[in-house]
Image (cartoon, grey):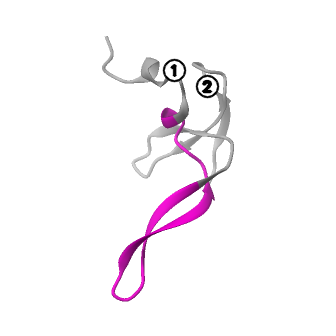
Amino acid sequence: MKADEGTCRGCGAAILWIRTPQGKRTPIDAAVKKIWIAVLDGDPPAWTWILRDGHESHFATCPQAAEFRKGRG
């Protein structure tokens, strides 16, 4: 994953900017965390949850996220 480093204007946290599959830029926390991911596994396939290293959306962790929501005001 290619990501541009940055700093959140709201809370000052280190973030990475990535592109979504739709081509839009979105911020994620720079710190790697343990996160739960749902995957299809088995035969027949069934959803299972696995714990992986990953990044969390910064919109989910930023205390100032409401400042950046579209359609405000």
| Mark 2: few/some/many CA within 10 Å (<14, 14-19, 20+) | some
> Quick one: quadrant of the N terminus?
bottom right
| Secondary structure under the numbered disc 1 in the rendered image | loop
In the rendered image, the vertical position of residue 42 relative to residue 71, given as above or below: below
Q: Main secondary structure of the magenta part?
A: strand
Label located before the other in sequence (2 or 1): 2
Position of residue 3 in the picture relative to residue 43 (left or right): right
In the rendered image, the vertical position of residue 23 relative to residue 7, given as above or below: below
- What is the quadrant of residue 47 in the picture? bottom left
Q: Position of residue 21 (x, y in %)?
A: 43, 52
- Amino acid type, residue under disc 2 in the picture: Cys
Q: Residue at x 67, y 41 (%)?
A: 30
Position of residue 29 in the picture relative to residue 40 (left or right): right
Which residue is tagged 2? 8
Q: Residue at x 45, y 17 (%)?
A: 67
Q: Position of residue 38 (x, y in %)?
A: 44, 64
Q: Position of residue 20 (x, y in %)?
A: 46, 47
> Which of 59 and 47 lies nearest the eye of the viewer?
47
| Mark 1: few/some/many CA within 10 Å (<14, 14-19, 20+) | some
**Are discs 2 and 1 less than 8 Å apart at CB?**
yes
> Quick one: quadrant of the C terminus?
top left
| Camera-nearest label, 2 or 1 | 1
In the rendered image, the vertical position of residue 52 relative to residue 67, given as above or below: below
In the rendered image, the vertical position of residue 13 relative to residue 17, given as above or below: above
Q: Which residues are magenta?
A: 35-60
> Which of 43 and 14 lies nearest the eye of the viewer?
43
Q: Residue at x 55, y 45 (%)?
A: 56
> Which of 27 and 41 lies nearest the eye of the viewer?
41
